């Protein structure tokens, strides 16, 4: 069984849906089912090799677990970096793309303001008229965006798109907010791990530069940074390539 299928059983199984209600997802999730879902979130995210892979897994789990969701997207905005976006679901690709390309929409609003943002019908929401046509064409109606605050690393949002208009009910909100809260902690741990790995790669490259050029530590860091800028690559990528080249030379 796929991970998203497992998550759907944990949260949505064995409970009737009130499809005629003005509230989308009118029942609260069962505590045991919610605990099972959060365990699945922890297991899937903590075994990810990178933050990017973790975002993909979170989007897929949310799309399978949150009642009525036709698309879920996760966006992270790091200091000085581009928006990292992962998404899963059967609809909403065009409106999602317009939101992140244009820099305006419920997900980015939630990330920037760090508040819960909802839209009863994105195709008619006056706050984002540029998304109206795409949302209608995509079959996206109600949207809820929950802010993510990954301390010292990034802000972002988990956005849930629904196929029907209306106010998101407690079932949907509690499930989405619980997933977002769990994800904040786990993404922070993954960022910490990546930083340690990246720092180790840079330190090894600096050692190679010192050995090759006979320079000091500060000069070696400057050479590495200058090389990264000249090549148009990030410092970690250049460091990894330098260490790999030095290892090949040593083996030959």
Image (cartoon, helix red, strand yellow):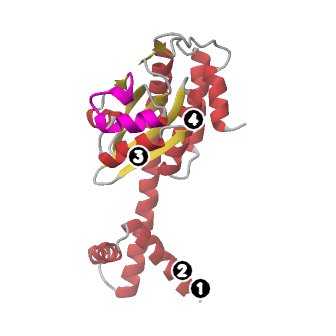
- Residue pictured at 57% horizontal, 35% vertical: 61
What is the CA distance from the residue labelled 1 to the residue labelled 3? 47 Å
What is the CA distance from the residue labelled 4 to the residue labelled 3? 20 Å
Q: Position of residue 34 (x, y in %)?
A: 57, 21
Whether residues under marks 3 and 2 lie with C-beta atoms below 8 angstroms apart, the answer is: no
The kind of secondary structure element at disc 4 is helix
- Residue pictured at 50% horizontal, 10% vertical: 21
Answer few, some or many: residues within 10 Å of disc 2's Cα (few below 14, many 20 plus, some between 14 and 19). few
Q: Position of residue 110 (x, y in %)?
A: 32, 33
Q: Say whether residue 249 is left or right of residue 213.
A: right
Q: Which residues are magenta?
A: 120-137
Residue ID for mark 2: 247
Whether residues under marks 4 and 1 lie with C-beta atoms below 8 angstroms apart, the answer is: no
Q: Position of residue 57 (x, y in %)?
A: 55, 42
Whether residues under marks 2 and 4 lie with C-beta atoms below 8 angstroms apart, the answer is: no
Residue ID for mark 1: 251
What is the CA distance from the residue labelled 4 to the residue labelled 1? 44 Å
């Amino acid at each position: 069984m796929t991970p998203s299928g497992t998550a759907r059983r944990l949260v949505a199984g064995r409970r009737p849906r009130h499809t005629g209600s003005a509230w989308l997802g009118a029942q609260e999730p069962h505590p045991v089912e919610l605990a099972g879902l959060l365990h699945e979130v922890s297991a899937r995210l903590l075994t990810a090799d990178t933050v990017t892979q973790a975002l993909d897994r979170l989007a897929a789990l949310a799309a399978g677990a949150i009642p009525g969701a036709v698309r879920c997207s996760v966006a992270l905005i790091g200091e000085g970096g581009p928006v990292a976006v992962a998404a899963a679901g059967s609809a909403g690709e065009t409106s999602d793309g317009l939101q992140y390309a244009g820099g305006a929409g419920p997900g980015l609003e939630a990330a920037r303001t760090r508040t819960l943002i909802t839209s009863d019908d994105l195709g008619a929401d006056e706050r984002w008229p540029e998304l109206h046509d795409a949302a209608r064409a995509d079959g996206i109606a109600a949207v809820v965006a929950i802010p993510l605050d990954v301390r010292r690393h990034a802000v972002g949002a988990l956005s849930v798109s629904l196929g029907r208009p209306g106010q998101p009910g407690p079932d949907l909100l509690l499930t989405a907010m619980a997933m977002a809260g769990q994800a904040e902690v786990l993404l922070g741990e993954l960022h910490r791990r990546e930083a340690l790995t990246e720092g180790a790669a840079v330190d090894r490259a600096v050692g190679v530069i010192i050995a090759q050029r006979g320079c000091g530590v500060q000069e070696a860091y400057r050479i590495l940074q200058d090389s990264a800028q000249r090549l148009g690559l990030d410092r970690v990528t250049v460091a990894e390539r330098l260490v790999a080249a030095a290892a090949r030379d040593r083996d030959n």
